[in-house]
Every structure is written in structure tokens, then in C-alpha cells.
Amino acid sequence: MRIRKIISAKTLQIILVLSAIVVVCGCASSRLTKRARARIDSVTISPNPSVPSQMEYFQDDLTPGSSSGLLGALMAVNGVMRTNNINVGRIIVDEFREQLAAKQVFPSIVKYGGEAEFSFKIHFYGLRFRPFAKDEHLGAVLKVTVYLRKANGKLLWKASADCSPDRTDAYLWRTYVMEPERLRMVFQQAARVVVSDLFNDIETD
């Protein structure tokens, strides 16, 4: 019985320590406060986000994979993206710059030499069947993390957001191949959703 009490006390101590770590880590990347923003007069936006080399297909259980029927189709869509210069990284950067300027979060957005810099990691992007839909239309999926760092590398803010296929228009894969601008459009819609959600973590006036 005494051994059980000692183990229980030790387990409780570990749980409390881990809980404290989780709380601290969560607070470190929750919101960009007005106080933190007030210390920054100018920002730059990195034009080169980290982007996966290939678009991915996600099954309904959110596990990356492919089926024999869609593998060739998605290879064709990838080819269309390259041929028509549909660059998801550039789409994200352009959308972020547009919303950042519109919201006037910082006094100045400069091309070079800002006091802090935004950079991006695109975890995945691709096309996926919409949940509960009975057709074979594919909407865009996208997940992005944004980082704001001082010139000395200190991380000031980090936030992530994603877009599910039911938040964009959706088409058959053949439509994307035959009409590439629809493909560009759904990724622009996904970028708008993601960036808008990222800005929810910035305290505004």
C-alpha cells in the first residue's frame, strides 16, 4: 500500500510538471498582443515560404494517401499547376501582404530591412473530397504556420491555420485540368480563409 502511495504521488508530480509545460508553451504562441506590436515600426514579408514539393491527396480520415483512380488524376493536376505557374507559396504571400496592409497592423511594410519579418511554412496543400458530399468534386485543402521574428532571430509570434475542402469551391479533377484558372481560384480562396484565421490571433485596436 505504501509503495502505491509513493507511485501515485510521483505520478501526480509528473502530471503537474507536464501540465505547467503545456500551459507555458501554449501561452508562448497564442496571440500577437498590441503591446508587442507597438515595439515594431516596420516589417518585411519573406517571399519564399517553405512549400512541399508536391500537392497531396487526403482520404476522408485525413491520412495522406492515394488511390489507383486518383493517382494519375492528381499527377495531371500537378502538371497543370506547374505549366500555368500556379504557385501556392506565392498565393499565400500575396494574400497575407494584402490583408496585412488593409488591417494596418504595423506602421510600415517594407521590402527589405524591417525590424521584424514574417515567414511561412506550408504543411500541406492539395485537393480533397468535401465531407458528406455525394459527388466527386474536390475542394482545396491548405495548412499554414506563420512566424514573426525579430532581425536577431527572436520569435515574437507563431500561429497556424488550415482550410478544409468545404470552405472553397469544388470541381471535378477533369475540370481543373481543362480550366486551370479554377484551380488557381480555389487555392486563392483557401489562402483567404487561412490568412483571415491567422489574423484572428493578432490583437487589433
Image: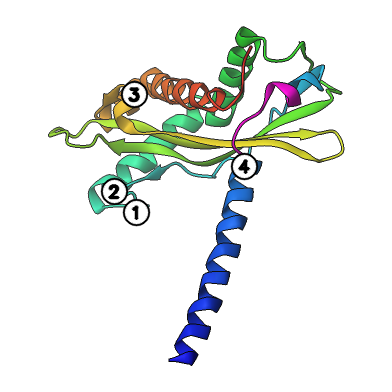
Q: Locate residue 29, reporting x and y percent.
A: 63, 40
Q: Which residue does the numbered mark 4 point to in the structure image?
A: 27
Q: Are marks 1 and 2 in contact (CB under 8 Å)?
A: yes
Mark nearest the camera among 3 and 4 is: 4
- Rounded to the nearest angstrom, the CA distance separating label 1 from label 2 is 6 Å
Q: Amino acid at mark 4?
A: Cys
In terms of depth relative to the viewer, which is nearer, 84 or 59?
Answer: 59
Q: Secondary structure at mark 1?
A: loop
Mark nearest the camera among 1 and 3 is: 3
Mark nearest the camera among 4 and 1 is: 4
Q: Which residue does the numbered mark 2 point to in the structure image?
A: 59
What range of the chain is rendered magenta? Answer: 29-36
**Residue 65 bears which disc, if any?**
1
**Residue 168 bears which disc, if any?**
3
* Residue at (48, 84) in percent of width and height: 5
Q: Amino acid at mark 1?
A: Gly
- Rounded to the nearest angstrom, the CA distance separating label 2 from label 4 is 33 Å
Q: Secondary structure at mark 4?
A: helix
Of the image marks 1 and 3, the number of the one nearer the N terminus: 1
In terms of depth relative to the viewer, which is nearer, 72 or 96?
Answer: 96
Q: Are marks 2 and 4 in contact (CB under 8 Å)?
A: no
Of the image marks 1 and 2, the number of the one nearer the N terminus: 2
Q: Locate residue 139, reporting x and y percent.
A: 31, 30
Q: Quadrant of residue 145?
A: top right
Instruction: Please give left or right for residue 176 compared with residue 80 in the image.
Output: left
